[in-house]
Amino acid sequence: MAGKDLDPSTSPRALLGAELRVARERAGMSQAELGEPLFVSGSFIGQLEAGTRRMHLEYAIKIDEILGTGGFFTRNCEAAAKSKYPDHFAAAAEAEALTTSIREYAPQIIPGLLQTASYAREVCRAYQPTATQEAIDELVVNRMARAELLRDPTTPLFWCVLDEAVLRRGGENPSVLAGSLRHIASLIRSHRVIVQVLPFSAGFHSGLAGTLKLMSFSDAPPLSYVDGVGMGQLFDDPATVAQHTLTYDLLTAQALSPRESLAMIESVAEEYEHDQHT
């Protein structure tokens, strides 16, 4: 095991996961064998090693005991846990950066990866009306840093279903939503993302419970994520992920085609540009 502690500025979770894989293999243990005394599955250990799961302190202490790593994981657990995102979203945001594909359903607002800075600023201010301007600026910077994920021309695959309510919900300045919708349309036309709109005419549907994000990885099992006000939960249980996948598949079946969705997005953007929306 390396004697030098991890540098928090260089993807500490991924580095910690890599060190865990080395230590486990050196001890001659499989992922399942290491998971057994921790009361977790072998796939959970795989997610720790891939960096898609955060190592909590209680696991780090036990891993040091099992693998005889001299407190390495205990010492470095705090560094790996540091995140610029809220606690309830940190694990999902950091897993997001390692994905091969993301499928997301957005019922209320434009997903973070598709937001413009001006739209993100209005959303963050709505969430935290009494926050300082500096705090809002930091939130926006971090959200725009996440959106850099889509600068790669091919990966990850990003497929999103937007409820029609997302297209109709604007703030005080109609041009902000118009610009955001034009941004989405540009990503669609450049073949970088797939977007479908779930129209009001679809009526009741499988996604009424709220947001949903599905994430796939090249070297770890898939995850799903749901969130609410100040809370979020990441799932790796295969049955739960399968149920969430079915939910998303049903949403795509009820949504407009990508071509029809693009037409609606650009039409609503034009309405806002001319401030015709009521």
Image: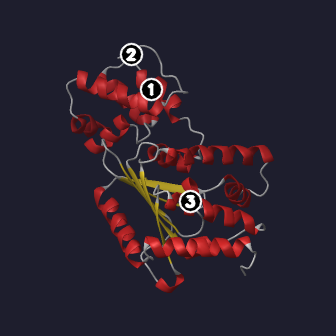
What SS does tag 1 mark? Answer: helix
Q: What residue type is disc 3 on?
A: Ser
In the displayed structure, does residue 152 sit left or right of residue 240? right
- Residue 74 has which mark? 1
Residue at x 55% of width, y 53% of height: 113
Labelled pair 3, 1 in contact (Cβ < 8 Å) = no
Residue extending furthest front?
Answer: 190
The image quadrant of residue 9 is top right
Residue at x 40% of width, y 46% of height: 99
In the rendered image, the quadrant that contains the N terminus is top left
192 and 118: which is toward the camera: 192
- Is residue 40 visible in the rendered structure shown here? no
Q: What residue type is disc 1 on?
A: Thr
Q: Does residue 201 sit above or below 110 in this rendering?
A: below
- What is the CA distance from the residue labelled 3 to the residue labelled 2? 46 Å
Provide residue 70's location: percent of width, then percent of height.
Answer: 38, 17
Q: Does residue 273 sit above or below 122 in this rendering?
A: below
Q: What residue type is disc 2 on?
A: Ala
- Is residue 95 visible in the rendered structure shown here? yes
- What is the CA distance from the residue labelled 3 to the residue labelled 1? 46 Å
- Residue 113 has which mark? none
First in sequence, mark 3 or 2: give its number: 2
Residue at numbered disc 3: 186
Residue at numbered disc 2: 2
First in sequence, mark 3 or 1: give its number: 1
First in sequence, mark 2 or 1: give its number: 2
What SS does tag 3 mark? Answer: helix
